[in-house]
Each structure stands twice: as structure tokens, then as C-alpha cells.
Amino acid sequence: MSGQPVLMDQDGGGDDFLAAALLLTMDHVETIGIVVTPGDCYIEPAVSVTRKLLDLMDRPDIPVAKSTVRGLNPFPGAWRSLSFAVDHLPVLNDSDTIRTPLVPESGQAFMARVLREAPEPVTVLETGPLTTVAAALEIAPDIEGKIKEIVWMGGALNVPGNVAEPGHDGSAEWNVYWDPFAARRIWETSIPIVLCPLDITNRVPVTTELVRQLGRQRRYPLSDFAAHCYAMVVKESYFFWDVLTAAYVGRPDLFTLREWETVIVTEGPGQGRTRVEPGGRKIMAMDQVDIEAFYAYILEQWAR
């Protein structure tokens, strides 16, 4: 392979699409596929956006697969509806046809097959829940040894979560809460995990100034796409969740990591919490990032 092989699994939120757009600009990475998990999206428009984005980037050689897994706790419908709006952005709709193929097998079967066939260990970039990865491991347990590491946007270690549901204590992050049992399944493996938790994403907001800078670069299709996606959400408290996670794959030098021992809570009012607990599963978490260098990096990568 020409670079580090990366298999991406994303769940169709606006930030997920932009994480994919960042990943595909990385010269040292070979993206071997993108799976769409029906988490923070409605699956059909999310798959459509993913395929159109690959067309926009002239990468119809990268296969897209639709996962058929289901989570325990659905994302809010208002959040999931953003996938419909993004699918209608003009920059994605210059053509009436989509060149990028949708593979006939399920996303979890595709993931199991691609990992099994990979000639070297693969980095899994995960910007949604871990359900599809867990399902792929059920299909082919031997692929555990084919995963170099999972780089995951998930969890809240020492800050409050972002789940505000009746009966919940607010300690969980949504990608874990959607399916805490899948997260616990991955925690039971020996696969190295690099976590991008709310602890660090809370410090990296999407700012009005950054959206304006992207707008000034709108002659570049990716900047135009990113500017429109972020313009729809910048009025809210929106952060670089998935894009920051993807940036670690391209520029790990911008980050410092810290080891934690953790457990996944699967029951009770803290369901989905990623709890720091001595003796728990060891993971690495992104602890610090050079924020200004990160902003400069994404502006540069999307100016093409």
C-alpha cells in the first residue's frame, strides 16, 4: 500500500462528513473504505452525502458501505435531520449521477472482509458509535489482530457528558451512549485505543471567524463544503469533535496523549459513561492540542 491503510466508520453527522473530507486530503494515508453507521443521521441521505463527497474529491475508487446495525439509545431526531440538509448542498449536486459505488454487502460484513484481506494492520478511524466494529468482530473474530489501533471520537473522562435524556445523569458522551454494550465489547479486546474525548473537544470550538475564513476560501470545493456545513450549526455550541479526531491521523505531532484506566458503564443513570477507574482498561486519550496549528492545518488541507 502507498500509505498507512485507514478504514473509516462514521455515523453521518455534519462533522463526520468533514472528518472524511479531511482524511482524504492526507498524502500519507490510503483510505480503503468508508462505512456509514446509522447513528447521528438518517442513513439514506448520509450514504448519499458520503458518495457525493467522494465524487467531489474525485475518489470514486473508495468503496462506501451501509451498516445495518442498530443502537440502544437513538440520537435526537433534530440532530439526525442535518443529513438531509447536507445532501442538498449545491456543491455536492453538480451532477445527476453518483460515480462512487455502494457495496452490496452490509457495512459490518464489508468491514470484516476488508480487514481480513488487508496485507498489513489497519487504522480504524471511528467517528460514530462502535457498534459496527463490534458487529464485524462477531462475524470475524480473527480481524482483531488486523486492527493497528482504533482512533475514536468518544467518551467524557473528567468533564460532564453531552447526553441530556430523561433519567440520565448527564455523564455520558453520545457515541458511547448510543450503544454502550458495543463499546464495552471493544474494551474487552486488546486493540489499542486512542480516544478523542469531550475533555479535549470542548476546548476546540467552531468559531464564527473560522467559518468566515472558510467562506473566503470558497473557490476551493472542500472549503465551500465545510463553510456551508458549519454555517448551519455555528449558532449552536458546536465543536470540532470528529474533525479533531481525524486530524490526529494526519498530524499526531499536534497532540499530546495521556494514559487512563477506564471502564464503560452499561446500566443505570450513568449508562454510556466512560469512567476513569484504577485497574480498568488502559487507553490513550488526546490530552492537549495546539489549537491554532490545528485551525491552520484544516484551512490548508481544505484549500485544494
Image (cartoon, helix red, strand yellow):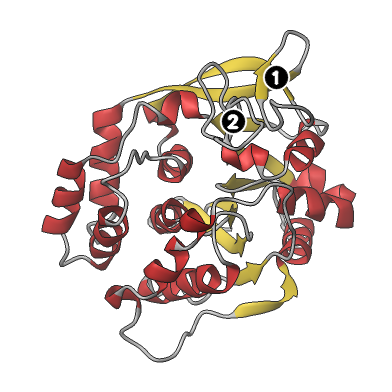
x then y, percent, for residue 294: 30, 36
Disc 1 + disc 2, Cβ < 8 Å: yes
Q: Is residue 153 visible?
A: no
Query: In the displayed structure, does residue 260 sit left or right of residue 28?
Result: right
x then y, percent, for residue 156: 56, 26
Name the quarter where the N terminus is drawn: bottom right
Q: Amino acid at mark 1?
A: Thr
> What label does residue 155 carry, if any?
2
Query: In the displayed structure, does residue 191 sit left or right of residue 166?
Result: right
Q: Residue at x 87, y 52 (%)?
A: 138
Name the one closer to the observer, 85 or 249.
85
Q: Amino acid at mark 2?
A: Gly
Quarter assignment of residue 105 = bottom right
Q: Is residue 164 above or below residue 232?
A: above
Circle 1 SS class? strand
Q: Is residue 146 above or below residue 282?
A: below
x then y, percent, for residue 57: 37, 70
Query: In the displayed structure, does residue 81 sit left or right of residue 224?
Result: right
Q: Residue at x 67, y 45 (%)?
A: 178
User: What residue did someone put label 1 on?
Assistant: 262
Q: Residue at x 81, y 38 (%)?
A: 185
Name the one closer to the observer, 213 or 198.
198
Q: Residue furthest top?
A: 278
x then y, percent, for residue 19: 44, 51
Q: CA distance from mark 1 to mark 2?
A: 10 Å
